[in-house]
Image (cartoon, rainbow, N blue to C red):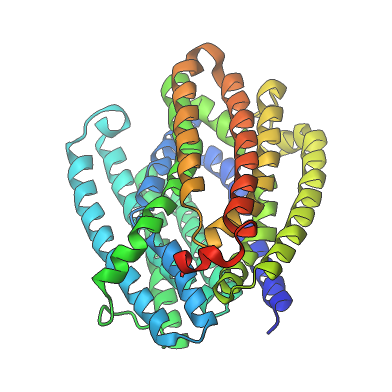
Amino acid sequence: MSVLQRVGKGMGAYSYAQLVTVSTQILGLPIFLYFWSLEEYGTWLMLSAIPVYFAMSDLGMVAVAGNKMTMAIANNEITEGNRIFQSAFLMTVGMILLVLIVSINVVVICDIGLLSKIENKIVLLLLIAASLLNILGGLIDAIFRASGEYARGTYLVTTARLFEWFFTIFAVYLYKDIVFAAIGYLLGRLLMTIFNFFYTNNRHKHFSWSFRFAEWSLIKEMLKPSLAFMALPISNALSIQGLTLVVGTFLGPATVVYFNTYRTLSRFLIQGAFIINKPLWPEFSRLFGLGDISEIRRYYNISIIATTAFMLMGFIFLYYSSDYIFEYWTSGKVTVMGEVYYPMLLAAFIAGLTQVSTTILSATNLHTQYFLFILLLSIFSICISYFGIEKFGLVGISTILVFTETILLLASSLFVFQKIFFKDNKNISKAY
């Protein structure tokens, strides 16, 4: 199968993934608000924002290992690929068990804010368990990505998300209780994880789910880029879930609904950028492992053109149609505040363009300095938001988002040319 065929199938699979993401976000809001009040839904949003941090418990090992597995398989080194996989599997299982034990103890002891209520404690622990299971889904995705079946892996992982959403909605419909919603979420994730595990194990037997060939030396070798990889999800959590918690703490759960609704619609632009760029991730890894920098540059340039064109069309559409979308989507419960929503839309447009450079750096394991830069910028922005939200409100936060995304766009482009195109093949030995 040619590169273009794999990328085409990958784009189809990721289109399905984004369709699921968009559909669940669009349908979820009116469904939840039908059964719950703004306060109840805001509480659910705040609690469900916390476990995102626990989904990082693999310390970035899955992403780095997936890249190295892809490079190994590209060079027909099957044994090496399996050794990398089992080492990552050992590290991941160990971290999941450790985090689960610590989480149970911390949540039980903590009695402040939302966690002063026993039902909220139960909900949080159930959601944390689901997030930890999601890490195993990352290993499944890594196997398919390394085996040249990115599209199939994406379908499996995405269907798991759809399954857990259906179970959550069904639980809300039956019991209208936040605890049962969390139970439904965890049950859906558990069932699909079990199915995906057996399916993957049967299809790709050259990757063995055991610790037999795991090596501590390899784990240590991957640990540095893995820890650096953690900077990206932590940064995303700070800018997305972190802002949700800041808004909820200072402006109340009801305002969280407004903020998240604006951000959900504006970030549809970024979903489009993901569709174009994510399928290129395994191809960038494979080409980098083979040392084909000129081909990487070609696909990089194509991705820039395609992403820019899509983002422009999406921005224009959402700018002029937002009033109608909010009216029908939320039944008039959430209206457009232009001074907040339009800057958030601009920030999403800029963030979409950044995905081109972020993808290539992520796929080649040359992300360390760039991701650390993102983390520092995210910490800076969350601090400004924390201390300024009471004075400037949501307007101030939307302005900060535009500023930080502009800085990241410039920085990501600089890092790509510095790490890859200006040095050609010199960095390959560092990544693989």
User: Which residue is rendered at x = 49% and y = 68% of the image?
Assistant: 67
Residue 198 vs residue 356: left or right?
Answer: left
Q: Position of residue 416 (x, y in %)?
A: 61, 52
Residue 41 appears in the picture as rendered: no
Estimate the x, y position of residue 27 in percent, counting from the top left. Answer: 61, 48
Nearest to the observer: residue 10 or residue 191: 10
Towards the viewer: 217 or 150 = 217
Q: Count of labels shown?
A: 0
Q: Residue at x 31, y 39 (%)?
A: 120
Give the answer, above or below, for where 129 lies relative to 251.
below
Residue 178: x and y in percent read 39, 43
Point out the image quarter for the N terminus: bottom right
On screen, residue 250 versus residue 282, left or right, reads left
Q: Position of residue 151 (x, y in %)?
A: 61, 73
Whether residue 251 is visible, yes or no, is: yes
User: Which corner quadrant of the image does residue 387 belong to?
Assistant: top left
